[in-house]
Image (tube, rainbow, N blue to C red):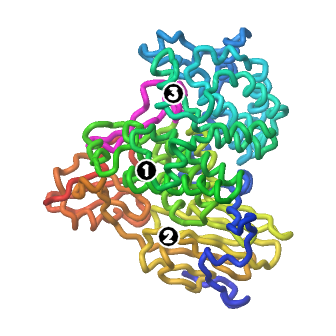
Amino acid sequence: MTPSRRSFLKYSTATLVAASLARTRSLFADGESKPLAEFKYGDVELLEGPLRHQFDTNHEVYASLDEDSLLQPFRQRAGLPAPGPEMGGWYSWAPLEDIDKPGNNGFAPGHSFGQYLSGLSRDYAATGNKATQAKVHRLVKNFAPAISPHFWDDNRFPAYTYDKISIGLLDAHQFAGAPHALKILDQALDSVQAHLPPGGISRDEQYNRPHKSDSFCWDEPYTLGENAFIAYQRGAGQRYRDLAIRFLPNSWYFNPLAAGENVLPGKHAYSHVNCMSSAAQAYLVLGPGVENDKYRRAAVNGFDFLSKTQSFATGGWGPDESFRTPGSGEVGQSLTKTHSSFETPCGSYAHFKITRYLTRITRDGRYGDSMERVLYNCILGALPRARDGHGFYYSDYSNDGAKFYHPYKWHCCTGTFAQVTADYGISSYFHDPDGIYVNLYVPSRVKWSRMGDRIVLTQRTRYPDHPSTQIEVTTLKTSVFRVFLRIPAWSGPKTTIAVNGQRLVSGPEPGKFLALDRTWDTGDRIEVEFDIHTTLEPVDAQHPRVVAPVHGPLALFTTGEAPASVRKQDLQSITQVASGSSDWQSKTDTGTLALKPFPSIQNEHYRLYLNLES
């Protein structure tokens, strides 16, 4: 590392402290640390790189959606003129008896409208694109007269669809300044009230209620709490706080999770991870205390069960969209039984949300570790949405894997895809009164206003293809603050951190946030070199010799024909073809084994898990 033009010792020597010993913190009433704050969307800019490319592609694709087509199912049920081409797939209306015919048309009419609106609102907040803001305003304005209680007649997913409408209107209000969005939110809630169940009931409880067919028991009322709490926080009124509390699934989900009981097996994977964010919001809004602390425990314990008993080496989970019984070997068995290994855009969106919440609440680096696994091994490798509405749905971890589009158009993952890429920036950094937390090592720029200063961190990196990052500081004046760096749990003892070319730390504690506490000036430069090793991760405890090679955060997929078995030492000696390359290889007795990370895979077949030789 080359020293900067200023000596590292120009100001006081930096003091290194653990993140848990932060100097000053605002506290909740009972003494618990106040959660970390998120940056605004416009405070974080993604710079050129894979995340920016995917963000820009999604912004352009979703900004091109036909507005009349988006509003058509609502207008039809309101008895209004409904021009525009029909979207088809899940999105459009169809008689109940036709839903299961080829094409799956009418599966969940209008279900993703709110998610598209949400994604566009966040895109505007991140970019300031006026055309995107104008589109959001038009959609909100024209949605208002199309709200009708008749929209919910014979609708199998009233809670699910309303929940998405609510976050769309809330984001349009908060991030795009859409006039009357909160008033329109009230109209939407009024229209659906009679169609909602009494509370956050489980699917089993839904089956015990009168229903027209089993498909009317697939609604997701237990996920409503998060967005209702957000509505209350954004000024929509007390009714939304009451609504959130009403739909918290305490008896069958949060209470047992808080008590340490793993109740995930058998449940729908995405929606029940999504529901964990309602527990996090309940804790944030209702505050800590003897009663409300159960929501914190439910979120923490639920995520622990997810990561320790349900997850693949990629960070993905839920083969065939269901959680499996720990100790059954069913996760490993799925490699030969399904190509539907992880519901990727939806699952990644839920994963990003809960890991953001838990990072903010606990200041624990392991949630950022988990987030980056899902980023690099799942969502960043998703195929772009096709213009006709076909989209990437499942990541395939089977023994003969390939990337493919779901056969049905405008499915749920086309909605969450718009939101998760918009959230890349706010997932990368957090702050508190002491400093900035660097959570993801991605090309980006974050701006922070603090005590009359305007502080900018600019991060340039090719991580994880190249094991390093550089962060440059810009300030209006000389400032004392902290930069907290997430040191991944996989970091080896040769990981180093330097400031202005002078090494400060060697072998920082893995799995923690490390604080650099010093006086900063414009041009100061932080450089991190990661010590990364390749490990072999079994798919589950019942299949200890079925392993995936993992290099730091990167799961490596064998491309082409995979051998029947490989030697352990061959997988442990995997190397990049060249420094910074996304192509990897291992020299074996039978030839060269070629591997790639998930985002680099295109049309080739691949295999994540390989059999070790006996």
Q: Secondary structure at mark 1?
A: loop
Magenta part of the protein: which range?
385-414
- Name the residue beneath numbered marker 1: 262
Label 1 neighbourhood size at 10 Å, few (<14), some (14-19), many (20+)? Answer: some
State the CA–CA distance, disc 3 to disc 2.
41 Å
Q: Given the image, on which type of amino acid does mark 2 rest?
A: Gly
Q: Nearer the viewer, residue 269 or 255?
A: 255
279 relative to 455 in the view: left or right: left
Residue 206, numbered label:
3
Residue 511, numbered label:
2
Q: Is residue 154 above or below residue 63?
A: above
568 relative to 501 in the view: left or right: left
Label 3 neighbourhood size at 10 Å, few (<14), some (14-19), many (20+)? Answer: some
Dot 3 or dot 2: first in sequence order is: 3
Residue 303 screen position, x and y as percent:
49, 54
Is residue 245 part of the magenta span, yes or no?
no
Residue 399 screen position, x and y as percent:
26, 44
Is residue 394 part of the magenta span, yes or no?
yes
**In terms of image quadrants, where is residue 62?**
top right
Residue 568 screen position, x and y as percent:
21, 64
Q: Given the image, on which type of amino acid does mark 1 rest?
A: Asn
Dot 1 or dot 3: first in sequence order is: 3
**Which one is in front in this view, the residue at disc 1 or the one at disc 2?**
1
Q: Nearer the viewer, residue 421 or 216?
A: 216
Q: Is residue 495 above or below residue 348?
A: below
Residue 358 seen in the figure: yes
**In terms of image quadrants, where is residue 569?**
bottom left
Residue at the (81%, 39%) spot, across then down:
237
Residue at the (75%, 68%) spot, across then down:
26
State the CA–CA distance, disc 1 to disc 3.
21 Å
Q: Secondary structure at mark 2?
A: loop
**Which one is in front in this view, the residue at disc 3 or the one at disc 2?**
3
